[in-house]
Amino acid sequence: MVDRKLSACYRSEHEKEKKKAFDELARLTEVHKKAEAELAAAKEENRQLVEAATPFVDSLVPLEGENAGRPFLERLHQASGALRGYIRDTARACVVSILGVVKALMPDQDMEPFASGRVAGVSDDNLALAEEQVQPTADAVMERLDF
């Protein structure tokens, strides 16, 4: 009789442990499914980001020469440096063009004061007025550019 009660007690405890293990397995299965869904969403977002960034990266760091076979992420990092260089070169070309026009219109003008960013005799108000006056022309030029 005692053996039968012990056996029943053992089975009862075993069933409780088994149910607990099954419940934990069910919980972990749900956690796993959620993690898989989040991973799939992150992979899709990554795919879309790469797809969107590829034309930009390819234009700055073409897949040829020393860049052939380089990972996309490495080329993306290179692209930011290439873009800074492109912007710097473009800004330099604009400054040269503007100063060239000034020098062509005023050949006797000493260009050295322009290097400091300020020209003697030009007040902030005069500069603001001149910028306001040339803004429509600058807008018209920018509209003609192919961006």
Image (cartoon, grey):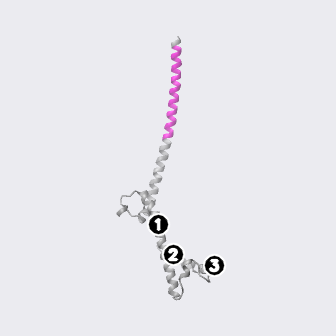
On the image, the x and y values in percent for residue 107 come to 51, 88
Asked if residue 74 is among those painted magenta in the image, a careful observer would answer no
Residue at figure coordinates x 46%, y 57% from the top left: 49
Query: Mark 1 sits on what residue?
Result: 83
Dot in front, 2 or 3: 3
Front residue of 33/50: it is 50
The alpha-carbon separation of the residues under discs 1 and 3 comes to 32 Å
On the image, the x and y values in percent for residue 146 come to 46, 73
Residue 57 visible in the snapshot: yes
Mark found first going from the N terminus, 1 or 2: 1
The alpha-carbon separation of the residues under discs 2 and 3 comes to 25 Å
Asked if residue 9 is among those painted magenta in the image, a careful observer would answer yes
Query: Mark 3 sits on what residue?
Result: 124
Residue at figure coordinates x 41%, y 57% from the top left: 72
Front residue of 11/96: it is 96
Which of the 4 quarters of the picture holds residue 132?
A: bottom right
Mark found first going from the N terminus, 2 or 3: 3
Query: Mark 2 sits on what residue?
Result: 142
Q: Label 2's element?
A: helix
